[in-house]
Image (spheres, grey):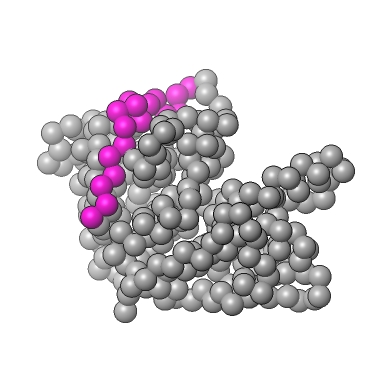
Amino acid sequence: MTAQPRVLANEIVARLREGEGSATAGRGKWRLDRRAVADRLHRLLDEPGLISQGRLNLCGPALLFKVWLERDPVACVTFASTLFEQGHARIGDLPVRPSRGLLEHEYGRPGRRPTNCPAADWMLMASVRDANNRIFPYRYERGIREAVAAMTLPGALRRWLSATGVYASVRDDTNLVLARGVAHARKLAPDPDRDVFLLVASEMFAGPGALPVRARRFVVSLLPNHWIALTSRVVEPGSRTVAFRFWSWGADQPPVLLDRRAFRRCYYGAVIADARA
C-alpha cells in the first residue's frame, strides 16, 4: 500500500469517528460504538491481516476484507463508513443491505459468550454474509445456527472478490464433494499479484487424538468447512508430508507440516484471483 491511499483512507475513518456530516451521529445505523469501530478501522489499515473472525464461522468474508484493505484501502473504508452511517453500502456494483435484525442486533452484549471478533470486524463480515443469505439470517453469536448461516460457498467468495474491482480475473477451481489432491495444490503459486484461497476441512490442522476423536474428524473432513489464504507454494518435503504457509484466524500462521493423507482428504480446491496491472 502506498502512503497516499493510506493517508486518504485514514482521513475517511477520522471523519467517521467524529461523525462529521452524519445525520445519525452517535451509533449510526448500528448498535455499535462509533469511536470503537473507527479506532479498529485505523488499526486494520495499518495491519489488514489482523481482521479476525474469532470464534465465528466468517472465514470467507474475513478473506475478502483482508485483501480489499490491502489492495484498495480507500474503497474498503468508504464501504465501511457508508455501511455504518446508512446501514447499507456497495462493493462495486454489488449491493450489501443487511437485514433489520442484524442492524438491531446487540452484538457483544454483556452476559453472552465471547466471540473474540471485534465489533468493526463483525459489522463488515456479518453484513456481507447476511446480505447474501436467502434462508438463514445472520445474527447469531456462535453455535450451530451461526455456523450454518455464516457458511460461504465458492461462488459467493468469487462474486465478492470480483466486485471489488481490484482483480482482472477470479477463477473458482473448487469441488464441494471431491477432494482435489496434492498434485492440484502443488500447481498453485501465490505472489504479490495473485491471491490464492484454499477451501479445506479445518480438521487437516487437528493434532492427534483418541480413536473416537480421530473417527469424528475423519467424518467431518468429508465436507469442506474453512477458507484460508495460501501464502507460499505447497511442497512435499518427504514422500508422506506436505508443507506450506497460510493466513487465517487474524494472523499469518506458523509453517505447517502435515501428513500427506490428511491434506489430500481435506483439500477441496482453490479460488485464484489475479490482480489488475
Image-quadrant location for residue 127: top left
Identify the image quadrant of the C terminus: bottom left
Asked whether residue 12 appears in the rendered view, the answer is: yes
Q: Quick check: is 101 in the magenta stretch? A: yes
Residue 201 left/right relative to 142 = right
Span colored in magenta? 93-110
Q: Main secondary structure of the magenta part?
A: loop
Most foreground residue, 35 or 71:
71
Identify the image quadrant of the N terminus: bottom left
Image-quadrant location for residue 82: top left
Q: Quick check: is 269 in the magenta stretch? A: no
Q: Tell me residue 130's x, y (percent).
A: 38, 38
Residue 17 left/right relative to 223 = left
At x 70%, y 55%, the residue is: 204
Q: Tell me residue 128's x, y (percent).
A: 36, 45
At x 27%, y 40%, the residue is: 97
Q: Find the residue positioned furthest to the right.
A: 211
Q: Find the residue positioned furthest to the front.
A: 177
Q: Tell me residue 109's x, y (percent).
A: 45, 24
Q: How many marks?
A: 0
At x 47%, y 68%, the residue is: 272
Most foreground residue, 129 or 24:
129
Q: Tell me residue 21's x, y (percent).
A: 12, 41
Residue 38 left/right relative to 227 = left
Q: Find the residue positioned furthest to the top.
A: 111
At x 63%, y 49%, the residue is: 223
Asked whether residue 52 appears in the rendered view, the answer is: no
